[in-house]
Amino acid sequence: MLLVVVVAVAMALLVAGRFFGTGPTFDEVVAFAQRGDLRAFPVPGSQATGIAGQAAPPVVPPATDQPPRNVILVVADGMGLGELSAASALIRGPAGGLAVESAPVVGLVRTWAGDALVTDSAAAASAMATGLKTPDGAVSTQADGSTPRTLFEAAAAAGMATGFVTTSGLADATPAAFLAHAASRDEYRTILEQLLSSDATVLIGGDWQRYPNALLQPDYLELVRNAESVAGARFTVVRDAAAVATAPAPLLALLPARPGSRSAHGPPLAESTRRALTLLGDPAAGFLLVVEHEETDEAAHDNDVDGVVAAMLELDEALRVILEYAAGRGDTLVVVAADHDTAGMAAAHGDFDDGIAELRWLNDGHLATWVPLFAFGPGAPRFAGVLDNTEIGRRLAELRGLEGLPPAS
Ligand SMILES: [Zn+2]
């Protein structure tokens, strides 16, 4: 049976690879499909063996048709349905219990890029930020070089406060697409220059000084080192995670990589997010906050089951902070969406007698599989059903009356 599945998957990928011009060899596909990782998971009725076990359900803001005042978009980088459902079982047990599972509104998102079926994070974030498809690798910039208005620009024009929190580098593709324009995600200095001159209230993310691609760009590293002299007139610039808890707004936190981490920077995402919510305060015109969690993508690229599970738990804890905040107010829309599926992790076997699950991967890159979306609070019903990733930005703009993005469908 396993062999049949392996061959079927291999043939499907080979056909797909031939059709779209790129793709793995037969041997590569078989090698991936035969790789399985075994992990214990919490079984009902037995002592929990998972890393977290059950948790109290989050307090959830109800979905209503009221217009929201504040908008919080959570981008879960690389969180495919396979990662999500496997991590749910491994963290909470087969019956689940991650915060997203309490969502009153669920959607599925098509993620294709402007020039390819499989998107990268830049094109996916650009679609969300501008409501328009862009080529893979482009940062809120069209193929003809034009730079459509982003959700952040529209929010600022409407007097809203804005913030971005990420565990990745602040010059990485997802924050770049919301906060900057560039023909390529690799233009780190150009991207960071735009962040340093931004009118955001709070920007918390990594300095990327250890990121391999950044090490090849001395002009970027020079700008990171000189951030205070460039942005210090407006921002309080902080360099260490502990300072985030007390630094005032406008805050620019350029944080070092966590010790031993593959890609994560700064404090736990729940702490950064809590600080961002405090610093954004309660502006009359509301605020737009985007929170990105990067490590699901990074771990999935490495086919690292434990890394995915740890990332999903960190994201879950941050989301509980956000939902508690939103539930206590009643005026805050929360949308949680993946930008793309990475590597197609899935539980292929799981026995309740021994509490062992077998995890498998489809590849080590991105996929065109639809990704999940969860919505809470006022305006949430606009995100039900199957939608294109461009509709995320368009519908957020529509609900908040922001101008300059294409109309929503
Ligand atoms: Zn990726």
Image (cartoon, grey):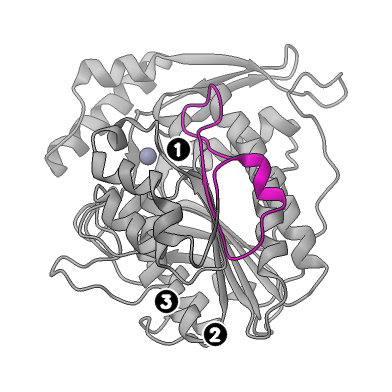
| Badge 2 amino acid | Gly
The image shows residue 191, relative to residue 403, as above or below, that is above
Mark 1 close to ligand 1, CB under 8 Å: yes
Q: Which residues are magenta?
A: 238-266
Is there any visible trace of residue 267 in the rendered image?
Answer: no
Magenta span: helix, strand or loop, mainly?
loop
Write down the quadrant of residue 131 in the picture.
bottom left
Query: CB under 8 Å between callouts 2 and 3?
Result: no
Q: Would you say 197 lies left or right of 259 here?
A: left
Structural distance between the alpha carbons of marks 2 and 3: 10 Å
The image shows residue 73, relative to residue 130, as above or below, that is above
The image shows residue 390, relative to residue 1, as above or below, that is below
Label 1 CA crowd tier, 10 Å (few <14, some 14–19, many 20+):
many
Secondary element at tag 3: helix
| Badge 1 amino acid | Asp
**Which residue is at a point 47% across and 72% down the rendered structure image?**
199
**Which residue is at a point 24% across and 39% down the rendered structure image?**
217
**Figure quadrant, ligand 1:** top left
Q: Label for residue 286? A: none
The image shows residue 56, relative to residue 299, as above or below, that is below
Q: Label for residue 159? A: 2
Judging by the rendered image, the residue that carries numbered circle 3 is: 153
Q: Position of residue 173 (x, y in %)?
A: 36, 51
**Which residue is at a point 86% across and 18% down the rendered structure image?**
47
Label 3 CA crowd tier, 10 Å (few <14, some 14–19, many 20+):
many
